Image (tube, rainbow, N blue to C red):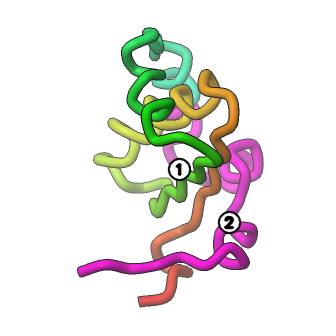
Amino acid sequence: MTTTITAEEFQQGMTLPQYLERMTMNRDRFVRAMDAVTITPDDRAVLERLGGPRYVMVITEDWCGTSLAYVPFVAKLVEATPGVELRVSCATKTRR
């Protein structure tokens, strides 16, 4: 199954700071997990190989343990890679 997110839908997503501000669960754990992430040149190369511009949409919820395990890495990777933009959308608000 392929789902396309339009440019307008992407722009409606939250930036990482907006998402962190909105979080009511696991915020401290999320921030600690981000602080613990180290991005290597090999990690950055994964996104750089795709060319640009690059857009990353994360669909998550703050209560989701799996997201807590993976989204901090993705956020740090985007932060460390010029030309990549991240937006976060809550799963309950995303169209099906």
Seen at 70% across and 56% down, the residue is: 22
Compute the Cα span from label 1 to label 2: 19 Å
- The numbered dot on residue 13 is 2
- The numbered dot on residue 94 is none
Pick whichever of labels 1 and 2 is earlier in the sequence: 2
Q: Along the line of sight, which residue is nearer the eye, 46 or 51?
A: 51
Identify the residue position indicated by label 1 in the image.
25
Identity, as a three-letter code, of the amino acid under mark 2: Gly
Seen at 61% across and 44% down, the residue is: 52
Name the quarter where the C terminus is drawn.
Answer: bottom left
The percent position of residue 64, horizontal first and vertical second, equals 36, 54
Seen at 67% across and 52% down, the residue is: 19
The percent position of residue 50, horizontal first and vertical second, equals 45, 41
Q: In the image, is residue 96 above or below residue 76? A: below
Q: Along the line of sight, which residue is nearer the eye, 59 or 80?
A: 80
Assess disc 2: are there few (<14), some (14-19) or many (≥20) residues with their C-alpha within 10 Å of its C-alpha: some
Q: Nearer the viewer, mark 1 or mark 2?
A: 2
Name the quarter where the N terminus is drawn.
Answer: bottom left
Q: In the image, is residue 83 above or below residue 89? A: above
Assess disc 1: are there few (<14), some (14-19) or many (≥20) residues with their C-alpha within 10 Å of its C-alpha: few
Task: Please tell me whether residue 15 belongs to the stretch shown in magenta.
Answer: yes
Would you identify the image quadrant in which residue 16 lies? top right
Give the structural element (helix, strand or loop) at label 1. loop
Boundaries of the magenta span: 1-30
Q: In the image, is residue 43 above or below residue 94? A: above
Seen at 55% across and 27% down, the residue is: 76
